[in-house]
Image (cartoon, rainbow, N blue to C red):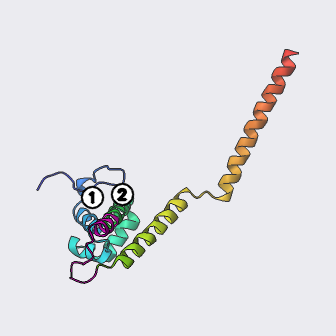
Amino acid sequence: MTDQPTSADAGGRPLSRAKSGWRNRFTEHLANCLNVEQAARRAKVSVSRAYHTRRTDSDFARCWQAALNRGYENLEMEILRRLREGDLIGQDGSKYDFTNAIRLLGMHRTNALDAETARHAVSASEIRASIDRKIEDIRTRAKAETDRREHDE
């Protein structure tokens, strides 16, 4: 085993050694299975601890989201591969559940879009303050132009 951390945050920066351990295992498994309970079990951590750490550690929260994004990308590629190759049988020998796989992808896209929208959301007071700053800037420039014209005359 190497001394290098095996997980990175959403920006690609490696997690510090102190923050790795079960967190690395958890996010790796989460990217593979898209199931928090299963990832926690494989990382040997309780589900409640994983959720608590996500709420209190922004680096881990970013890694968690990045793992989900990788997992959904993998699912999308798996669906496309199966459709292209005509691979319609799942691991257990039954018909592959394309309907639920595609439904999950749709839900993920909706959730990702909602999260992105919320991240860029601006309050009404912030909009008003921005407008006020722009108006003040226009007034300052107009006054400066008027003063310049009066001085030139």
Q: Which percent across, then down, holds residue 131?
A: 71, 47
Give percent across and percent down for residue 110: 49, 68
Residue at image position (61%, 57%) is: 122
What is the quadrant of residue 125 in the picture?
bottom right
Q: Tell me the kind of residue under disc 1.
A: Lys
User: Disc 1 marks which residue?
Assistant: 19
Lower sequence index among marks 2 and 1? 1
Location of the N terminus by quadrant is: bottom left
Q: Is residue 152 left or right of residue 92?
A: right
Please tell me how crowded label 2 is: few (under 14), some (14-19), or many (20+) other residues with Cα within 10 Å.
some
Left or right of 1 on screen, residue 151? right
The quarter of the displayed image where residue 148 is located: top right
Secondary structure, mark 2, is helix
- Using the image, determine if residue 103 lies above or below residue 136: below
**Residue 33, how many percent across, how many down?**
28, 71
Name the residue: 36% across, 57% down: 59
User: Which residue is at a point 73% across and 37% down the rendered structure image?
Assistant: 137
Q: Quadrant of the C terminus?
A: top right
Does the segment drawn in magenta span residue 85?
Answer: yes
Foreground residue among 92 and 34: 92
Q: Is residue 85 above or below residue 92?
A: above
Q: Please tell me how crowded label 1 is: few (under 14), some (14-19), or many (20+) other residues with Cα within 10 Å.
A: some
Magenta stretch bounds: 76-95
Q: Quadrant of residue 98?
A: bottom left
Q: Residue at x 69, y 50 (%)?
A: 129
Q: Tell me the amino acid under the disc marked 2.
A: Asp
Helix, strand or loop status at disc 1: helix
Residue corresponding to mark 2: 59
Cα separation between marks 2 and 1 = 9 Å
Do callouts 2 and 1 mark residues in contact (Cβ within 8 Å)?
Answer: yes
Q: Is residue 33 above or below residue 60?
A: below
Examine the rendered structure and indicate whether residue 89 appears above or below residue 60. below
